[in-house]
Amino acid sequence: MNHLPFGLLIGISVLAQNPGPAKNAIGMEFVKLAPGEFVMGCSPGGNDCTADEKPAHRVQITKAFEMGRFEVTQSQWQAIMGSNPSTIKGEDHPVETVSKDDVHDFLGRLNARNDGYRYRLPTEAEWEYAARAGTTGAQTASLDEVAWYGANSGDETHPVGTKKPNAWGLYDMLGNVREWVEDVFARDFYSNSPLADPTGPQGRGGGPQGGNRPARGGRGGLKQQGGPAFRGGPGRQLPIMRGGAWDNPADFLRISARYHYYGSTLRVSDIGFRVVREPV
């Protein structure tokens, strides 16, 4: 594949937001993001970073993609699945208490509508590229301006899009709920990541073990605050979540922070998702 020149990629990345969001039949809005290049992983001066956020490394996104402007809402989940599993109810709140397996089921049914797009979870690199929106810090702005988290959430989720968006028009990239991405975790992947369009190690995680962070599930879910995290055995590859949530303290809400402590069946009230779509 021929890649765009480095300088051109940097120039394009700051213009990545499209003029206006597109919307599908169930009201999901999307922002088209242009190709670009960024540094993935621990932000400069990131004293709170953990080992899994290092080393910081250059990544190129070589193809444009459309990212969900908001986290998927409970009404959108209901429209496709016919039920609402969320613990903290609200039609315009993010859907939560959904496992990665549940999300793949949702995406399969959404794709079966054949509306001209293929819907999927973002890769971890796509997620961080979109979350950074051309910035390099641990957050894009003051957390209270852009995120619902432990200090301001009142111990619950909130309607999507009620905090300020990032520079590319994406809301709740930090806070409200953590978000499933398609990748699984491997300890050495950041050290060996491809430059162009990394998709994480091959394979799927599963089972109630693995990772290096405390399991925080909020109301109605697994909750283990403090103490040692579950850890996987040799070769264990576990799904990754990004973004921090309504029940997390401020130091968890770093753009580079990664969560990977359980398998693809985990359902807790602080994990949801957003989707990417691409034309077929």
Image: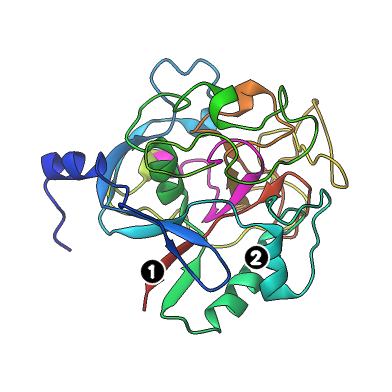
Q: Residue at x 73, y 53 (%)?
A: 96
Q: Which labelled disc corresponds to residue 278?
A: 1
Q: Quadrant of the C terminus?
A: bottom left
In the image, 125: left or right of 176? left
- Furthest toward the right, the residue is 220
Q: Are marks 1 and 2 in contact (CB under 8 Å)?
A: no
Q: Earlier in the sequence, mark 1 or mark 2?
A: 2
Q: Is residue 264 visible?
A: no
Magenta stretch?
Answer: 172-190
SS under mark 2: helix
Q: Which labelled disc corresponds to residue 162?
A: none
**Magenta includes 182?**
yes
Give the label, 1 or 2, closer to the camera: 2
Q: Residue at x 12, y 39 (%)?
A: 7
Q: CA distance from mark 1 to mark 2?
A: 19 Å
Q: Residue 96 or 73: which is nearer the viewer?
A: 73
The correct choice, above or below, for 280 with respect to 199 in the image is below
Residue 240 x %, y %: 59, 48
Residue 159 x %, y %: 67, 45
The correct choice, above or below, for 141 with respect to 127 in the image is above
SS under mark 1: strand
Mark 2 = which residue? 76
Other residues around mark 2 within 10 Å, as few (<14) / some (14–19) / many (≥20): some
**Magenta includes 197?**
no
In the image, 238: left or right of 129? right
Task: State the image quarter where residue 26 is shown.
Answer: bottom right
Q: Residue 245 or 88: which is nearer the viewer?
A: 88
Other residues around mark 1 within 10 Å, as few (<14) / some (14–19) / many (≥20): some
- Which amino acid lies under the numbered mark 2 shown in the image of this protein? Gln
Residue 207 x %, y %: 75, 56
